[in-house]
Amino acid sequence: MIVTHNKPNIVTMTIWLPELTSDGPRYRAIADAIATARSKGELTAGTKLPPHRDLADTLGVTTGTVTRAYGEAARRGLVRGEVGRGTYVLPCQGDPIAVYQRRENDSELIDFMVNAPPSPRGGLHATAPVDFLRRVADRGYVDELFEYQPSGGTLRQRALGAAWLESRGVTDAEGRTLIALGGQQALAVTCMAELSAGDHVATADLTYTGLKTLAHHQELRLVGLSHDEEGILPDALRAACRSRRLSALYVIPNIHNPTSATLSLERREEIVAIAREHDLAIIEDDSNGPLLTDPLPPLAALAPERTFYLCTLSKAIGPGLRLAYIVAPKKTTGCMEMAIRTSTWMATPLMVEMASAWIEDGTLEKLIEEKRQETRVRQELALELLGDTPCATTDTSQFLWIPLPRHDGDTKADGDLVCGPCWRSDEFARHAKAQGVRVAPCSIFSVGRSDWPDAIRITLPEPDLLRTGLTTLVDLLAQAPAPGEVMA
């Protein structure tokens, strides 16, 4: 039950009275109650939970029990504790299904949240699928594409995929390439084949939300690693290897989601050396790699014996093209194929054949270049509209990472300026939504405690929406947050 009190000039206070219905330890029952209230919408994103002592007194438990309960809720990604401020409910935005449900319910909002490639008007993007379907019909093999196919693709389709990946720098891909039903399934079957419940997986402390969702369902334990403008810090990986037994490292080396960082060759080589020293599997998510015109060697080329290379076409062509290539270490291809068969049996044959035909006749690279050109146009417009607002991105990135500014505070008697307040990303996202714009707050990407300043990720809708939405965001960024909506 929720009881809310409003008083003039005082931040809204919420007294949460959980119903402890689950069996087992009391701390776990409290965490379960938080999860239930959050899923029902009784605890909304940004709600401040009662102080530990107050809730302990209300429930007749020890303060330590509440502390442990809040810790368990944080481990599940339900809440975030902020030193000196309290514990706040996190949004459910890490769940891809919830994201799309909100899109349907809030169709009037300008969507800067969902990461999908821009669709240029006209051009090859509009004609290539129609041309492919016409060729299939003319050649009379439609029926074959509605039959069962080998899990992981036919030998021809795998060979074509391997050849395309080798042109992108993945060495010796033939014989090790499999085809999955999109990037998320590629990640899921890799974890299914290589990892077990309870395994520790290292990743940047701001990472792809799909990994967080998958880790929750497969009971994997994510270990957040500090990073900088280039990506994961090797020293952070070394420290994590010393402090616990890691099973794998998940890394996005090119146009990291959400920060747009790209690892240098030197850092890639250092990360590979650490992985070899501690016998870590490497899961290399190269979803954004095809957007780069001159990519660096992938980790799969530096350490093919331990790297699972994943490359989806969803970010380069469109999310409806549910297809991803996996290049696995030779000794694991059998297990990977079984994992694909167990989960979906196969990728959709029509989609696989479309991608294969486009590789064969050169259409795929032309489509990707068309996407790059459209992305550059939208990037240029976004940077023009942002003006002096700092952000991190690249010219072919489909998103921008915008640290939330700290506003000027009071002036001391000696004339020095005191640093003022900074938005919390969840509160900024809430205010932006109220003004008709959806953005992704940094909290949905966070693994454990991140030292990264509060920030938002925005994607690039069509130019008219981009102009309207960014004008709104720039105005909001210029406003100082109200008390209770700030980062200390």
Image (spheres, rainbow, N blue to C red):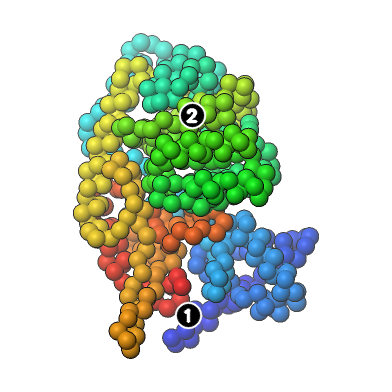
- For marks 2 and 1, the one nearer the N-term is 1
Q: Which mark is residue 425?
A: none
Which amino acid does the dot numbered 2 rest on?
Leu
Percent of width and height locating residue 232: 48, 46
Q: Which residue is mark 1?
A: 11
- Secondary element under disc 1, as helix, strand or loop, is strand
Percent of width and height locating residue 470: 27, 58
Spatial distance from mark 2 to mark 1, Cα to Cα?
Answer: 53 Å
Identify the residue shown where x is 51% and y is 52%: 226
User: Where 421 falls versus 228 (above or below)?
Assistant: below
Which amino acid does the dot numbered 1 rest on?
Val
- Secondary element under disc 2, as helix, strand or loop, is helix
**In this view of the protein, can residue 433 be seen by the observer?**
no
| Residue 68 or residue 143, whichever sits in front | 68
Disc 2: CA contacts within 10 A as few (<14), some (14-19) or many (>=20): some
Percent of width and height locating residue 68: 70, 65
Q: Which residue is mark 2?
A: 302
**In this view of the protein, can residue 208 be seen by the observer?**
yes
Percent of width and height locating residue 440: 41, 55
> Which-is-in-front pick, marks 2 and 1?
2
